[in-house]
Image (cartoon, rainbow, N blue to C red):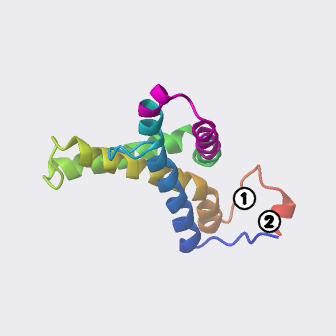
Amino acid sequence: MASNRFSLESFFVRLFFAFILVFATYNPSNYSFYHWISTGLEAGFQPLMAFSGIVLLIGWIVYIRATITSLGLTGLILAFAFFGTLLWMVIDWGIVPADSIQIITYIVLSLLSMVLAIGMSWSHIRRRMSGQVDVNETDEELN
């Protein structure tokens, strides 16, 4: 039986896999599924491409479904507003140059990974902070 204990370590595991999912799908280094498919289609669509796409799709569905379920529309809006204004401040303060599209892309992909990891973890965090349990959890999962 899996443990329901939430820790900083379990959050970082979720964050690590969110980074893998996001950056394996697309990143500006030209080593991503997007670049592999866009340049590899001339040679023909291969079974490994299809398999990799299905694995990424499963990962996206799991992360997005969990994020939407735990954060809801309001939480998603607040998370993107929080990270969006954080990015705006970093650019406005001159920490990141506004004309560096590659750096900004890496930051945006990292922030998306953080939103997904927070979404995957939010039910655990809320339960720890408030003692309240999500409606979709069952008694067996809590014991």
Question: Could you tell me if the residues under marks 1 and 2 are in contact, i.e. CB atoms within 8 Å?
Answer: yes
Numbered circle sitting on residue 133 = 1
- Considering only vertical position in the picture, is 3 above or below 64? below
Q: Earlier in the sequence, mark 1 or mark 2?
A: 1
| Position above or below: 98 against 4 | above
Q: Tell me how far mark 1 sits from mark 2, CA to CA.
A: 9 Å
Relative depth, front residue between 27 and 8? 27
Q: Is residue 59 left or right of residue 94?
A: right
Residue 29 located within the stretch drawn in magenta: no
The magenta-colored residue range is 39-60
Residue at 18% across / 44% down in the picture? 100
Local crowd at mark 1 within 10 Å, few (<14), some, or many (≥20)? some
- Circle 2 — which element? helix
Vertical arrangement, residue 74 with respect to residue 143, above or below: above
Return the residue nearer the eye: 124 or 19: 19
**Left or right: where 85 falls relative to 40:** left
Which amino acid, mark 1? Val
List x then y, in percent, for residue 31.
40, 47
Which quadrant: the C terminus? Answer: bottom right
In which image quadrant can residue 141 be found? Answer: bottom right
User: Which labelled disc corresponds to residue 142?
Assistant: 2
